Image: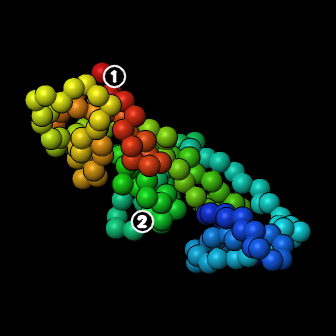
Amino acid sequence: GKQWSVLKITILQPGKGGAFVQAEIRDIKSGNKSNERFRTQESVEKLMVDQREATFLFRDDDTLTLMDTKNYEQFELPVEMVGASATYLQDGMELSVNLVEGNPVSASLPPHVTMEITEAEPVVKGQTASSSYKPGILENGERVMVPHHIEAGSRIVVSTEDGSYVERAKN
């Protein structure tokens, strides 16, 4: 059979008939994405996945160049294997890479990354220290909602999963 990497799963239960699983999948060899439906009684074989740590070296358009931290070999990955979190990549960052039969199938960033705020709206006088947030711009150009005490030049910790503010960075 074919080898697929599952990107997203939705379990659907229509009013009539049995439940089924809608899966967004990517062919490991070709990289093509598709949607597949499975009945709940169907089964699929799980592939043996090896996990390796790699260091991010640089990005060239749609390709990431990484270096295996064990044997120092360089290899390339399509940016889409990292997904939307690719915007938070930093030189020298450690990524966790999943491999099937020696071929990379996905990669993930650390859960949090420290970045600098390049722009933040000034605090409006009279606004109390409530739990309200204001927009800020990160060094990578992404928008993030930050507490009022965060100013331009501040370093903050950001979630690589959803781009949200976590905390002010500890020096």
Q: Secondary structure beneath disc 2? A: strand
Q: Residue at x 13, y 28 (%)?
A: 126
> With 160 as the anchor, is 97 left or right in this view?
right
Q: Nearer the viewer, residue 154 or 78?
A: 154
Please determine whether, in this image, residue 128 is positioned above or below residue 31: above
Q: Which mark is residue 170?
A: 1
- Please give left or right for residue 103 compared with residue 38 in the image: left
Which is nearer the N-term, disc 1 or disc 2?
2
Residue 125 lies, in percent from the top left, at 10, 29
In the image, residue 143 above or below residue 30:
above
Residue at label 2? 63
Across and down, in percent, residue 18 comes to: 84, 73
Relative depth, front residue between 69 and 114: 114
Which residue is at the far right? 41
Q: Quadrant of the N terminus?
A: bottom right
Residue located at (58% from left, 51% from top): 97
Q: Residue at x 24, y 53 (%)?
A: 141
Looking at the image, is 17 positioned above or below residue 60?
A: below
Q: Quadrant of the C terminus?
A: top left
The kind of residue tagged 2 is Thr
Give x and y (percent) for residue 65. Answer: 43, 58
At which x and y percent is residue 113?
39, 39
Q: Secondary structure at mark 1?
A: loop
Tell me the tag on residue 126.
none
What residue type is disc 1 on? Lys
141 left or right of 15? Answer: left
Regarding residue 92, the answer to whether it shows in the image is no
